[in-house]
Image: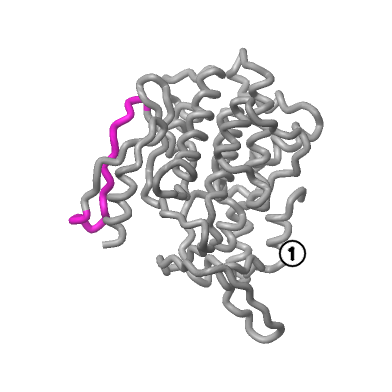
């Protein structure tokens, strides 16, 4: 089975910031994955829940850096390149020494950057999905970069980007951080529980997160550069465009108009083909080619979601 082969491959990937996958059980109706046990639970529980962990700023910064290192390893340093596809705070577990480890490789895909990948059954978690992946199924390692940017903002704010996701009046942390950053008050974004913190580190993390959550995947840095920027070894430019994001309301609206997700739901295959373009005018809308990023959703809606500096 392809699934078993991929799991066997992923189980050989080892890094201090990745949860060790010991194996899987394929005999049950739903395949079961067996991971190492991490006693301090998940990052979302520590940040947003009623957990006993009190994460000060130095610990939060090291967690942010550790998560970045783990993703960079998956993308660039492992013998096989892996796109996780579901980076989020609940998939970051914390060990006894408060070191972060990325977990849940259930959605991970082995990645070949020489080909364009279009996923016909988009998986992941709203609040962390890159626009091009959620709306078009276009997958590169930059979907993980986007999700990391969200997690980094959550670490700074101590606030989830996924609370009340179906409340149309919800103010997403993207909106709040951008308003504060644009008005020269980024430190007001910091979790009020943090009474002491390094202002320069906080500002650096916010800038890195804004670069990671740009609408165009080409504008997002690689994860190795993210690590360098967090370490202060590379510059995180102050001049950055407004981050882009989607909401469930936008995807639901696109669904009604024939979005990628609605027209392909139920299919679990992955199309992997050389990049090509498609054309044509009038008549029924042609199915998008893997290399074609022309939106299958209404153009004004898609543009408002993904355009840089919206």
Quickly name the residue at label 1. 300
Give me the residue at 65% from left, 35% from top.
Answer: 208
Q: Position of residue 122 (x, y in %)?
A: 49, 59
Q: Is the residue marked by circle 1 packed among few (<14), some (14-19), or many (20+) residues within 10 Å?
A: few
Q: Residue at 44% of width from left, 43% of height from top?
A: 74
Work out which quarter of the rendered image holds the N terminus and state it.
bottom left
Residue drawn 72% across the image and 60% down it: 303
Kind of element beneath mark 1: helix
Outermost residue on the top side: it is 196
Q: Is the magenta stretch mostly helix, strand or loop?
A: loop
x and y percent of residue 23 in the render?
A: 24, 45
**What is the x, y in percent for residue 107?**
40, 52
- Position of 237 with respect to 8 (left or right) is right
Task: Choose top left, top right, bottom left or bottom right for residue 98.
Answer: top left
Q: Is residue 184 magenta?
A: no
Task: Judge from the rendering whether residue 123 lies leftward or rightward of residue 13; answer left or right.
Answer: right
Which region is colored magenta?
26-40
Point out the residue furthest to the bottom here: 283
Queried whether the magenta region covers residue 31, the answer comes back as yes
Q: Is residue 52 above or below residue 254?
A: above
Whole-percent x, y for residue 292 in the image = 62, 69
Q: Say whether residue 229 is left or right of residue 64.
A: right
Q: Residue furthest left?
A: 27
Work out whether residue 111 can be spotted. yes
Q: Can residue 163 be seen in this view?
A: no
Colour treatment of the image: one colour
Q: Which residue is drawn at 31% across and 50% down?
A: 9
Q: Which of 236 and 89 is in front in this view?
A: 236
91 and 167: which is toward the camera: 91
User: Exactly how many numbered labels are in the figure?
Assistant: 1
Does residue 75 sit above or below 282 in this rendering? above
Residue positioned most to the right: 183
């Amino acid at each position: 089975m392809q699934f078993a082969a991929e799991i066997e491959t992923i189980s050989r990937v080892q890094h201090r910031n990745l949860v060790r996958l010991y194996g899987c059980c394929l005999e049950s109706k739903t395949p079961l994955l067996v991971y190492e046990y991490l006693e301090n639970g998940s990052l979302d529980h520590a940040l947003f829940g009623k957990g006993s962990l009190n994460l000060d700023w130095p610990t939060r910064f090291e967690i942010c850096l550790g998560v970045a290192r783990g993703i960079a390893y998956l993308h660039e340093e492992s013998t096989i390149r892996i796109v996780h596809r579901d980076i989020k705070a609940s998939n970051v577990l914390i060990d006894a020494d408060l070191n972060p480890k990325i977990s849940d490789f259930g959605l991970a895909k082995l990645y070949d950057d020489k080909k364009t990948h279009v996923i016909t059954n988009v998986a992941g978690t709203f609040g962390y999905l890159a626009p091009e992946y959620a709306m078009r199924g276009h997958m590169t390692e930059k979907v993980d970069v986007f999700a990391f940017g969200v997690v980094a903002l959550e670490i700074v704010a101590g606030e989830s980007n996924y609370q009340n996701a179906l409340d149309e009046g919800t103010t997403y942390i993207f909106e709040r951080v951008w308003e504060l950053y644009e008005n020269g008050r980024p430190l007001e974004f910091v979790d009020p529980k943090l009474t002491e913190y390094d202002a320069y580190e906080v500002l650096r993390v916010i800038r890195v997160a804004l670069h990671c959550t740009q609408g165009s995947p080409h504008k997002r840095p690689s994860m190795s550069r993210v690590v360098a920027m967090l370490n202060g070894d590379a510059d995180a430019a102050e001049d950055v465009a407004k981050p882009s994001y989607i909401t469930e309301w936008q995807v639901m609206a696109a669904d009604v108009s024939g979005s990628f997700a609605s027209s392909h739901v139920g299919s679990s295959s992955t199309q992997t083909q050389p990049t090509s373009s498609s054309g044509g005018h009038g008549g029924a809308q042609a199915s998008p080619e893997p290399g074609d990023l022309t939106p299958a959703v209404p153009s004004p809606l898609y543009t408002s979601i993904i355009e840089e500096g919206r």
